[in-house]
Amino acid sequence: AFGAPMVPIAQSTLLDTFPREQHGLATALFGFGVVLGPIIGPTVGGAVAEAQNWRWAFFLIVPFALVTVLGIFLFVRDRKRTEPPRALDWTGFLALATALAAMQLMFGRGERNSWFESTETIIEAVLAVGAIYLFVVHSLTTKQPFISFNLFHNRNYSVGICLAFIFGMLNFTLMVMTPTMLQDLRGYPDSVIGMLLATRGIGSIAAVFVVVRISNWDPRMALSIGFTCQALSGYAMSQFDINMTYWDIAWTSVLQGFGIGMSWVPLTLIMFSTVKPERLDEASAVFHMLRNFAASLFISISIAIVVRSTFINTMALNEFISLFNKSLLFPNVTGPLDFGDINSLALAGSEIRRQATLIGYLNVFKLFTVLCVLPIPFIWLARLPRHDR
């Protein structure tokens, strides 16, 4: 949790250091770490966990952290500020933190607790609504709020923050859902899953180079291409069957990685192109907070969809396994299975659970595709800054 400010501080420092005409190149280079880090980490971690022990995966960060700390002291210079730092608005901070935590718990545990049939879910919902109300009212009435709503008077930033929320929902979901799908349905080992996930990095690297080469393009066009590539990847994954191959996972991962890489740079350019330098810290913090919250929120929703869909489809498919189903009397339908034998029934039940689970994952991929397509028209609500026209 204490590492949460690192990315927004790094990005605001980067944007403040480089002139606006070089923000595209600087953001592209920064995007290497943002996009590739979550891809390389699970890949290497999966190999280490399989070769040694899962605990060793957590020690991998230690040498990189030490080098980073040394680099900060040697190369990063403190920025000169023309105004004194603001006092922390504890009321706004605690209200926002409570609202986000309550919503995360509600969506993460809602399916397990049968949603609003559970007292816990009701309490979390009431707490989230109350905390949001307190945060909004307090922010509008205090002189120095934790997050100033004046920031959202900037049209590009307001459009960008909505797009960033959806981008956050899309960014990590497939990377979290795909490994569990491959383990549950195909029985792939951790090392193979890690290598398949690493193919996403190929697309991301290619996209960053493409973005640098087309830096004179309208960033709205590049962002639209990025969301379209992710939509095509999600649609292809929604057509998977139980016999999906390595190639099926690899090429869809490459396409998804390309879409993410194409989206990151133009999204940040649109958001921060018209933000005043003294507001970059606040703008970057809100951006990454909402992006990370959206990612965890949609992952929780996706897991709930898989669990719910698996239960519903298991019950629906089990209705066909009955002595009253005359189609099961024909050998060309049942094959080697004899539904009068308990072993055959157990085998059929296992296959039904696999197919029902697959349907749950396919439903997530369909929702992913819809979320990729929906924001594309709204991208064009953003305006190009004068120096990009």
Image: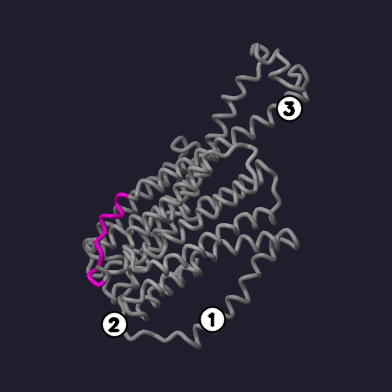
| Mark closest to the chain's N terminus, 3 or 2 | 2
Q: CA distance from mark 2 to mark 1?
A: 26 Å
Q: Residue at 73%, 24% (x, y): give it.
A: 345
Indicate whether residue 63 is drawn in magenta: no
Percent x, y of residue 146: 31, 67
Percent x, y of residue 96: 36, 59
Magenta span: 377-387
What residue did someone put label 3 on?
Answer: 346
What residue did someone put label 2 on?
Answer: 84
What residue did someone put label 1 on?
Answer: 69
Q: In terms of image quadrants, where is residue 287?
A: bottom left
- Please, is residue 82 above or below residue 92 in the view? below
Q: CA distance from mark 1 to mark 3?
A: 56 Å
Mark 1 residue element: helix
Crowd rating for badge 1 (residues with CA inside 10 Å; few <14, some 14–19, many 20+):
few
Crowd rating for badge 3 (residues with CA inside 10 Å; few <14, some 14–19, many 20+):
few
Label placed on residue 135 = none
